[in-house]
Image (cartoon, rainbow, N blue to C red):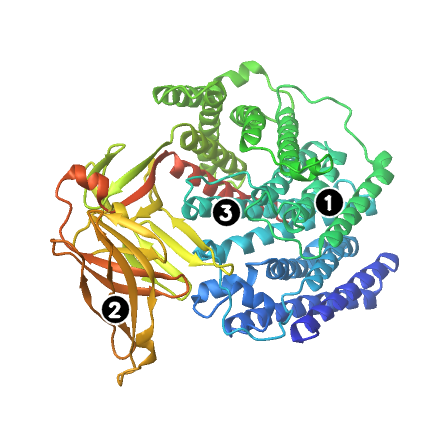
Amino acid sequence: MMNFGNLTMWLALIAICISSASYLVLNVKKNSTVARGAAHLSLFCFAILVTIASISLMYFILDHRFVYSYIARYSCRDLPLEYLISSFWAGQEGSFLLWVLLSSWLGLILISKARDMEPQVMLVYNLNNIFLMILLIKQSPFQMLSFTPVDGNGLNMLLQDPWMVIHPPVVFLGYAAFAIPFAFAVAALWRREYDRWVNAALPWTVFSFLTLGAGIFIGAYWSYKVLGWGGYWGWDPVENASLLPWLAGTALLHGMILQKVRGRLRKTNFVLAAFSFLLVIYCTFLTRSGVLADFSVHSFVELGITGWLVIFMFVFMAISIGLLVVRAKEIRSVKEAANIVSRESGFLAAIVLLSTSMVLIGLGTSAPLITRLFGNPSKVSTKFYVDTNLPVAIIVLLLLSLIPLLTWGANKVSKLAPRLIWPVTGGVVSGVVTLWNGFPGAGVFLLSLFAGAAVATNLFLSVKLIRKKTIASSAAIIHLGVGLVFVGIVSSSAYDRTQKVLLPQNILKNVMGHEMRFNGAAISTNTKGMWLHLPVSVKSGSHQFMARPDIYSERMRGGQIQRYAHPHIKRGLIRDLYLSPVEYEPGQKNAHSGSRFYLEKGKKIRFHDYELTFTGFDISGMMHRESSGSVSVGADILVSYKGGNPVKVKPVIRIGGTREETNKVKLPGPQQAYITLVKVDATAKAIGLAYEGPACAAKKDAERSCPALIAEISVKPGMSTLWLGALLILAGSTIGISRHWPK
């Protein structure tokens, strides 16, 4: 259906096609001011039209225009402002629009930076935008429903996090930026200028490395913070979809520097520039075509764009391979072998290792697609990724500890020896600390050893170069960050301790040296579901704090209840304490005054001497609205005391008017025990009850029958080191952009 949003996108497609045609003319008539003006004007119109479409979608989201299918699927009326904004890119259609928006803005900047290569660079870059626009029009966020829902489905609870506002835009900025080095590479082949393009494309390559790297690290931190499984990287295909082009871009970055300084790897850099961009398209195909829908928790279902993605990929593959084959004989290669003890050899080895890791991860990620050709599709385990990349990581860290100490050209071993004090010291310290905590296995031990060596070498160089106030410190800072990331990976994976525990309410328990007391559950609700707040008092030595994990329950469209566990993380300089709720058991919790629990229809709970079964609602009171405007709802509950015959009780809640009113109902048996109906959830067919009565008398009895929280407690050393390393990688990359950006 044609509407304002769709019309704007069609006009944007026309504008970018006009710009491309104008640049094509400009390649033939190099001095045509008319063609150049038309190219610039239409490109500017393209960016404006895409921006208008984006503003329109955002306005419709904020205005709750649920007649648009996309908005109805990913937004709702009670979402806070920041999550209404992030629902813009929560689904396929919106994320493609975000990608095009960022790409259009980068294109306006690129015009002024491409200089005399502009006609060729912008033609290739525009072709990328044309394909993105075709995908966007094919699955438009402006498709309208035949009716207008009262409310939308809302945003998945796991996406209702502040990082959702930041993470996707950063990732898609990286995706958009990787098209620029590719455009320069194709333009260089077109123009037969096989060296000059490197200077122009290098800052864009660093920018791509920075933005996509930031997206990867933000995603890892978000996963660690929210998902509750205690990890930060699960080797999911969608995670790998960002890692693969980033590894290719990292290899390209090293290749460009080597070509700029020593004139090497001319052909290789064209291949790496193509791979870094083509991997963005290929991974988009894997995660958005539906081929991995059964193997990834993040992948999207197929929405009719698979064919276009394949065409998109093969067109750019044909352009890059075709031009490289045609020009291959003209591209001069350096015949002289690099000295084995030189920075050149280190760069060459690093590029080979990064490419090897990229291929291994790519094969693992593509396993469902490859195995589909021979029968039933299947995926590889996380062990495949770890086992195949561990040797690569060890050698990379060894190089990081030695290569920065070398100079370009030949190095005398006798002059190198005094500099080895830094990696040797770092390796020895790391090795001793590792063995002190227990031998983790030969592979992990070597990884730890060389990670420590890499940290020491690059810390020394970073301090030295920063004192000289030179931006040449960027590489040392990045490499220092890489070393620290691997120190964090070794520490958090080899030496983490995890224990699944039962925490009875109000009973002190010692868990891995921490005294913990579960304080009881509290319930809060919204229009979509219910929060179960599960505070735990924790004492570690003289330090005390309150951990606040939660479990959120939400009824989905099909009627099933979806649960989300939100962990609590107590961050420390050396280690994190990670408390993830697994299950709340009302029937095993301490029955004391003020205790609350949640009960679904037909389900039983047991606690202390009672068994309760919720059989249904009594809505007869809703037929008679009182003068105050309130109505009464009752809950039919069967209660048995010490296994005796069940007795029917009916607590009632009066809803509406100026305030809610409840009645307290006595439970059968000699004890003074009461329940109160405090929550009615008609959608989930469940109720919330409050209990007042005697507490469990003995600790042994409490362990068995009191309300309890089942939680997974983890002690994770080295996490702050990992995040510090990530920040240093991004900081060094930022410095690197200013270093390489043409003045």
Instruction: Give the x, y percent position of residue 324.
Output: 82, 40
Tell me the residue at 23%/52% (across/down): 645
Residue type at the position of mark 1: Trp
Q: Foreground: 338 or 451?
A: 451
**Marks 1 and 2, how far apart at CA:** 77 Å
Q: Which mark is residue 197?
A: 1
Task: Give the position of the N terminus as an image quadrant.
Answer: bottom right
Q: Residues within 10 Å of mark 3 (few under 14, many from 20)?
A: many
Is residue 68 found left or right of 610 in the rendered image?
right
Q: How crowded is mark 2: few (under 14 residues within 10 Å), some or many (20 or more)?
A: many
Instruction: Give the x, y percent position of residue 680.
Output: 33, 65
Q: Which mark is residue 652?
A: 2
Of discs 1 and 3, which sits in the foreground? 3
Spot the residue most to the bottom.
627
Residue type at the position of mark 2: Val
Residue type at the position of mark 3: Gly
Kindly check if marks 1 and 3 are in contact, taking CB atoms under 8 A apart as contact.
Answer: no
Tell me the residue at 85%/36% (across/down): 330
Q: Kindly tell me whether residue 738 is visible in this rendering.
A: no
Q: In which quarter of the image is residue 198?
A: top right
Residue designated by label 3: 219
